Amino acid sequence: MQPGAAVDTVWPVLVEVAPRVARIAVFIAGGVFLANVAVGFGLVEKIATFSKYLTRPANLPDEVGTAIVTTAASTTAGYGMLADFRESGRLDDAETLIAVTMNTFFGFVQHIFTFYAPVLIPILGLEVGLLYVGSRAAIALGITIAGVLAGAVLLPRGGTEVDRQDDSVTTDGGAESAVGDGGRAATADHATDDESESVPDVLHTAAEKTWPKIRRIVPRLAVVYVLVTLLVRTQDVQSITSVAEPLTSLLGLPAASLLVVGVFAFDTTTGAATIAPMVGSTFTPRTAVATMLLGGIISFAVSTFKRSIPFQYGIWGPRFGSKVIAVNTALKVVFIAAALAILLAPV
């Protein structure tokens, strides 16, 4: 490739990726900063009072509820907090995977107010829109419940509190933990001396502990995003939709569903606008929702490559990020398949 051609190819990618990486970096910074502030002010215990009914059945530490609740406001911030807990030693890999799985429904909740209610339901109409959103909510809730059950079965009851506290004091051969001043020890110190740190001191300490994580995550995130976007620009990734044809035939969906799946896989709003005029003539409400869910499976495959891999690798690194992607993908496919079976069952 000639230098001029390389510049023409790479420059638009950098222009596209830079705002996305910057936006994600802001949310990650916010999540990590909030985690440190929550520890500094003792808010972890207050939030845990409400979230313990979710975390304790899963045998997770109460403070994990802080990240799960945060996910309802910002998925990226919630993930950032979980990453912080894992790197500080407060969560091991198994606990983190279960916490990520439990996050699913809370991550869905925010989209109800930002996308489904104001955008998708008006396009699809009340009946189809509510059926689709309800199906997606049930899928997300099922995955969250599966996470709780997995924690109840796979994790030791009560966790390993002593080990977790000891590990949280130092990580990476003695470096200070990113959350608090020694994880649980910090919250215990705060509980015994509420005046030990002023508000400016807590905020300043939280900011100091946030910067090293951002400095480590953001470059990795940017590099992977650029590489993936370049690959998408130069390869025919959309050919993946061809796998939908045997699925639509197997499920007995109308022939027009293949077009909808293809459009829906790459743009949800456009896909909804494509199928909406055909409801009542070509599609019933149930087959319309089933078609959109099938499009969601294909869309998830595409979005995993374009967005999830860069994001998860940026947050966790390639090894653990691959585990998170594998678990998320398997659970979503299983629960979407279950929803399709229910929707297409003879009434």
Image (cartoon, grey):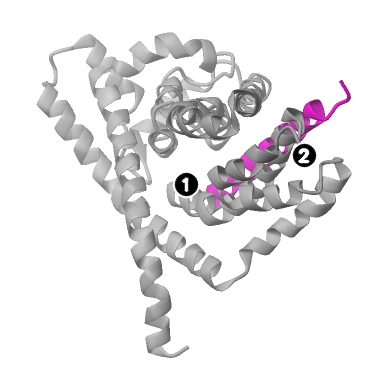
Q: Quadrant of residue 49?
A: top left
Whether residue 16 appears in magenta in the rendering, the answer is no
With respect to residue 194, does 252 lie above or below? Answer: below
Quadrant location, the C terminus: top right
Whether residue 332 appears in magenta in the rendering, the answer is yes
Secondary structure of the residue carrying tag 1 is helix
Residue at the image point whose x is 63% and y is 69% from the top: 236
Q: Which of 254 and 62 lies nearest the eye of the viewer?
A: 254
| Residues at marks 2 and 1, CA–CA distance in whole angstroms | 45 Å
Decide if residue 262 is on the left or right side of residue 214.
right
Q: Quadrant of residue 63?
A: top left
Q: Amino acid at mark 2?
A: Thr
Residue at the image point whose x is 43% and y is 64% from the top: 226
Residue on which the image places disc 1: 316
Secondary structure of the residue carrying tag 2 is loop
Crowding around mark 1 (Cα neighbors within 10 Å: few <14, some 14 to 19, many 20+) is: many
With respect to residue 250, does 220 lie above or below? Answer: below
Q: Is residue 66 visible?
A: yes
- For the record, the magenta segment spans 319-347
Q: What mark, if any, has residue 168 been given in the picture?
A: none
Horizontal and vertical percent position of residue 22: 31, 52
Horizontal and vertical percent position of residue 165: 40, 25
Q: Quadrant of residue 181?
A: top left
- Residue located farthest toward the bottom when viewing the structure as drawn: 2
Q: What mark, if any, has residue 282 been given in the picture?
A: 2
Crowding around mark 2 (Cα neighbors within 10 Å: few <14, some 14 to 19, many 20+) is: some
Horizontal and vertical percent position of residue 334: 74, 35
